[in-house]
Image (cartoon, rainbow, N blue to C red):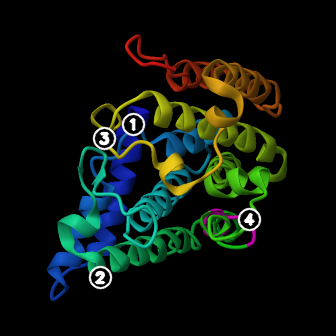
């Protein structure tokens, strides 16, 4: 089965569990699917699966569950990020954000339900691989909440003074660290050696996102642009300029490749990161004045 098909199947199966059967709130059940599809590039579960396969992928069902749960957390964070109390974004992935399509109360419940479902999907693997399931739950918890997960990342925006490194690692890097570590755990490996790779990919993604926010329009991105300037957030382009940020991005990705731990699929994983680097590096539009 092709990797993307495998990932989409795992996510669809997870959403079906979350929607349940019989007498359920139909609007919320519908919103769970709306919030997770179409799913964009599925970068985080792709990285997770690539690491799992590089480490042997001896329990594919566990890897599938890990990939689905990670993407559910990511989608939940997007639903919450778009709410009026945060980014107040009307568009996500080229269509109305969940609170615009379903209402603010249902958007809150959708994000909450996806978070809970993510951990349910992992818990369901306890009978098959109890030690791995427990470590996956722990890792995803650490990268989702406080003190260093995506909740902490969002909370930094409410502080008078921002620790830029901690902010970026929590807001953007946390789920990439989860991706590399959970991929290793799903295949029976220790998570710690995979921290640096995830952190570097996350840092690269943040710089690339800053570049896209500065260089592209909302139609190209499928979401509002200029959000960093609008909300007064620090970003790489304002600090380094466009060319400086692109140079920084390339340095980070080179370091990411060098940080890959020794594993049976090390060469294939390095090639995946190289391909990812090519896709990640934005090209400044010729008409844009920068």
Q: Earlier in the sequence, mark 2 or mark 1?
A: 1
Q: CA distance from mark 3 to mark 4?
A: 28 Å
191 or 126, which is in the foreground? 191
**Which label lies toward us, 2 or 1?**
2
Report, in whole angstroms, how far the alpha carbon at label 2 lies from the one at label 1.
Answer: 32 Å
Q: Position of residue 264 (x, y in %)?
A: 74, 29
Going from N to C along the chain, the mark reached first, 2 or 3, is 2
Kindly identify which residue carries mark 4: 148
Check disc 1: other Cα within 10 Å, few if <14, some if 14-19, many if 20+: some
Position of the N terminus, as image quadrant, is top left
The picture quadrant where one finds residue 277 is top right
Q: Which residue is mark 1?
A: 4
Q: Which residue is mark 3?
A: 222
Element at label 1 = helix
Q: Residue at x 67, y 63 (%)?
A: 143
Q: Is residue 203 left or right of residue 279?
A: right
Please say if the residues under marks 3 and 4 sit with CB atoms less than 8 Å apart: no
**271 above or below 93?**
above
Magenta stretch?
A: 147-153
Mark 2, Cα crowd under 10 Å, few <14 / some 14-19 / many 20+, is: few
Q: Quadrant of residue 31?
A: bottom left
Tag 2 residue: 105
Location of residue 164 with respect to 54 vertically, above or below: below
SS label for mark 3: loop
Q: Tell me, yes or no, if residue 269 can be seen here.
A: no
Q: Nearer the viewer, mark 4 or mark 1?
A: 4
The 10 Å Cα crowd at callout 3, few under 14, some 14 to 19, many 20 or more, is: some
């Amino acid at each position: 089965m092709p990797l993307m098909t495998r990932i989409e199947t795992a996510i669809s199966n997870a959403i079906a569990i979350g929607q349940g059967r019989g007498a359920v709130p139909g609007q919320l059940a519908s919103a769970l699917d709306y919030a997770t599809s179409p799913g964009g590039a599925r970068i985080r579960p792709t990285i997770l699966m690539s690491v799992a396969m590089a480490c042997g992928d001896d329990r594919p069902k566990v890897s599938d569950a890990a990939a689905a749960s990670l993407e559910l957390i990511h989608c939940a964070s997007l639903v919450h990020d778009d709410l009026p109390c945060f980014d107040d974004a009307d568009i996500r992935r080229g269509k109305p954000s969940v609170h615009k399509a379903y209402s603010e109360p249902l958007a809150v419940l959708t994000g909450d339900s996806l978070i809970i479902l993510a951990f349910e999907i992992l818990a369901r693997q306890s009978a098959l691989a109890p030690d791995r399931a427990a470590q996956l739950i722990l890792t995803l918890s650490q990268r989702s909440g406080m003190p260093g997960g995506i909740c902490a990342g969002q909370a930094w925006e409410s502080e008078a003074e921002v620790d830029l490194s901690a902010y970026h690692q929590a807001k953007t890097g946390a789920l990439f660290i989860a991706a590399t570590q959970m991929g290793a755990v799903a295949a029976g490996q220790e998570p710690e050696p995979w921290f640096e790779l995830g952190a570097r990919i996350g840092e690269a993604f943040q710089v690339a996102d800053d570049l896209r926010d500065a260089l592209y329009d909302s139609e190209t991105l499928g979401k509002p642009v200029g959000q960093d300037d609008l909300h007064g957030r620090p970003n790489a382009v304002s600090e380094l300029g466009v060319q400086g940020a692109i140079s920084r991005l390339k340095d980070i990705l080179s370091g990411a490749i060098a940080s890959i731990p020794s594993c049976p699929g090390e060469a294939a994983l390095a090639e995946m990161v190289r391909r990812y680097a090519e896709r990640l590096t934005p090209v400044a539009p010729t008409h844009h004045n920068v």
